[in-house]
């Protein structure tokens, strides 16, 4: 049987790109260590075969619910078994994400109730030797309501101009701080308005940079200076019931 090969929009450029090396060698070492332990085992009670990794220990069989040390099987997992194990982990990840999302919502809700309670100076705040912005429970757990400044960009272009302007010249007149025009005790003077000198800390979002690289590859245009293109392999998983829409 000949495998179906879908034409991809990067087919023309991918063969020329080297494979992306692991981006985080420390993490890759952990992945490799776990990979080295992947093996097949069978449940001693029902014979159900599973792909496992990590320590061999007594475990609950997913098929019969029995608790026993699995029996090793001396053959590598098949491709379908690996994918089934992957699908199981993705399913578990989705359930955990749903739980985390519910917890985040509940924590935010309780935070707002606690904040209002503190603003009302409800009973309990400041008891047991803590300050008025704190509440200590009998077990010693303490919560504090604190305010702190919070910055936000309200004019992206003005902020970008400030970032790229040098810190030793006025953005309004181009003069240094000591220029007479900055002596605010004199009529017609204006306050020294230096730039932030942060041009080197500005960068495109990684996703924007990546989109620019991909567009230019397809168009045959030279890549942006200082960038390199690689072929990065990723796995696209489509659980049953959802539709693969391509890439
Ligand atoms: Zn079993
Ligand atoms: Zn000026």
Image (tube, rainbow, N blue to C red):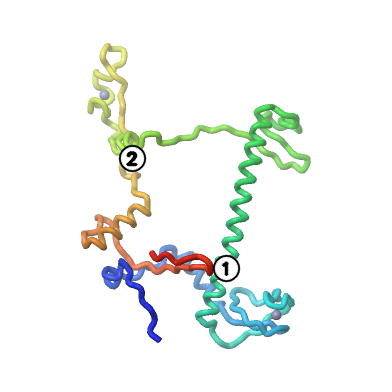
Which residue extends farthest left? 221
- Residue found 70% across the figure and 83% down from its top: 46
Q: Secondary structure at mark 2?
A: loop
Above or below, 150 against 235 in this view is above
Above or below, 88 against 205 in this view is below
Residue 170 position within the rendered picture, expressed as x and y whole percent measured from the top left: 27, 28
Image check: 152 left or right of 41?
left
Disc 1: which residue:
89
Question: Local crowd at mark 2 within 10 Å, few (<14), some, or many (≥20)?
Answer: some
Residue 67 position within the rendered picture, expressed as x and y whole percent measured from the top left: 74, 76
Pick the front one: 204 or 148: 204
Q: Mark 1 CB in 8 Å range of ligand 1?
A: no
Give the Cα separation between the discs numbered 1 and 2.
Answer: 43 Å
Question: Local crowd at mark 1 within 10 Å, few (<14), some, or many (≥20)?
Answer: few
Q: Secondary structure at mark 1?
A: helix
Residue 143 position within the rendered picture, expressed as x and y whole percent measured from the top left: 67, 38
Query: Which quadrant of the figure shows ligand 1?
Result: bottom right
Which residue extends farthest right? 138
- Residue found 34% across the figure and 52% down from its top: 208
Residue 198 position within the rendered picture, expressed as x and y whole percent measured from the top left: 33, 40
């Amino acid at each position: 049987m000949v495998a179906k090969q879908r034409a991809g929009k990067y087919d023309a450029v991918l063969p020329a790109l080297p494979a992306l090396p692991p981006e985080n060698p420390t993490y890759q070492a952990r992945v490799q260590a776990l990979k080295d332990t992947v093996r097949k085992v069978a449940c001693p009670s029902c014979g159900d075969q599973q792909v496992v990794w990590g320590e061999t220990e007594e475990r609950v069989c997913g098929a019969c619910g029995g608790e026993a040390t699995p029996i090793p099987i001396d053959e590598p997992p098949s491709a379908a078994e690996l994918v089934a194990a992957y699908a199981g982990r993705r399913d578990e990840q989705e359930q955990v994400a749903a739980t985390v999302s519910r917890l985040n919502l509940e924590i935010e809700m309780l935070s707002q109730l606690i904040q209002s309670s503190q603003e009302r100076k409800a009973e309990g705040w400041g008891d047991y030797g803590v300050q008025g912005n704190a509440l200590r429970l009998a077990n010693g757990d303490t919560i504090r309501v604190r305010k702190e400044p919070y910055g936000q960009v309200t004019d992206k272009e003005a902020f970008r101009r400030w970032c790229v302007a040098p810190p030793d010249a006025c953005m309004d007149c181009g003069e240094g701080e000591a220029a007479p025009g900055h002596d605010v005790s004199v009529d017609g003077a204006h306050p020294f308005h230096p730039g932030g000198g942060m041009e080197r800390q500005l960068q495109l979002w990684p996703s924007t940079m990546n989109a620019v690289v991909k567009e230019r590859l397809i168009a045959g245009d030279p890549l942006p200076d200082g960038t390199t293109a690689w072929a990065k392999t990723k796995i696209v998983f489509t659980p049953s019931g959802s539709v693969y829409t391509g890439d």
